[in-house]
Amino acid sequence: MTNLKDKNIIVTGASGGIGNSIIKKLYQAEANILASGTRIEKLDQLKGQYENIKILKFDISQSGKIEEFIESATKELGGNLDCVINNAGVTQDSLAIRMSLDEWQKVININLTSTFLISKFAIKKMLKYKSGKIVNITSVVGHTGNLGQTNYTASKAGIIAMSKSLAIEYAKKNININCISPGFIKTAMTDKLDDKFKEAIISKIPSGRLGDPKDIANAVLFLCSNQSDYINGETLHVNGGMYMA
């Protein structure tokens, strides 16, 4: 099994289904983990479930406090930072002609701007040790587009392009920035979908099923490990063949 012993890792959006699965996988690999999210009761559950895990409640929409967040999280982990998983994000769906400027800006600010700022301040920490990895969770719809999600798809496509630029800038400093692009994953959100709509989605997936959060966690583990040291600026598609670039 891939081992991440003594690697200090921050995971945002840790209180959701995919975040929980990422935490479990990294814990099994013996990483030192700081789990962040907005729901303290969920974070407390993680702390009770996994020995020695650190938690820090933080809302990434507070862009002016992100530098302080990275500083506090790194200090909690012991002073250095090996990997950041930018997993937190939001949706606020609407057809374009009905979408308000606030709905557009909220999703762009949280999904794209906050991911940039977290990456920026994490890289500053990583430069000190001339090594590090950042894994940004995007989405298949950032490649394909999706009905009623102009804000969300723009934010996810933006993360992909941004990650490539960051990878170019810091590759020579031994800092790798990559993306994981999930397809439709079985979570509490997809459980609420109408059966007919769910069947329509599955019909477009060659594997014939929704993904499992552990499928994303496995990809995160790989990109955090030294097995991915020569992979940089790439997007790993985890979607059962739904999108083939």
Image: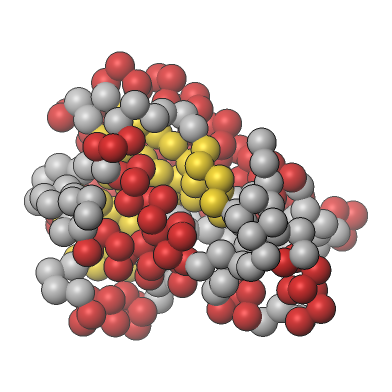
Q: Farthest residue in the front direction? A: 207
Q: Is residue 200 visible?
A: yes
Q: Residue at x 40, y 76 (%)?
A: 39
Measured along the vertical axis of the image, is residue 20 above or below residue 242?
A: below
**Count of numbered marks:** 0
Q: Is residue 60 visible?
A: no
Residue 111: x %, y % from top left: 55, 51
- Judge by depth and name the residue closer to the eye, 145 or 155: 145
Q: Does residue 77 appear to the left or right of 199 in the view shown? A: left
Residue 235: x %, y % from top left: 52, 38
Measured along the vertical axis of the image, is residue 162 above or below residue 208?
A: above
Measured along the vertical axis of the image, is residue 124 above or below residue 172?
A: below
Measured along the vertical axis of the image, is residue 65 above or below residue 131?
A: below
Q: Farthest residue in the right direction? A: 97
- Judge by depth and name the residue closer to the eye, 59 or 243: 243
- Judge by depth and name the residue closer to the eye, 230 or 114: 230
Q: Residue at x 67, y 65 (%)?
A: 208
Splitting the image into 4 quarters, where does residue 100 fall? Answer: bottom right
Visual colour scheme: secondary structure
Q: Residue at x 46, y 60 (%)?
A: 215
Q: Residue at x 44, y 37 (%)?
A: 178
Q: Farthest residue in the top direction? A: 172
Residue 13: x %, y % from top left: 42, 63
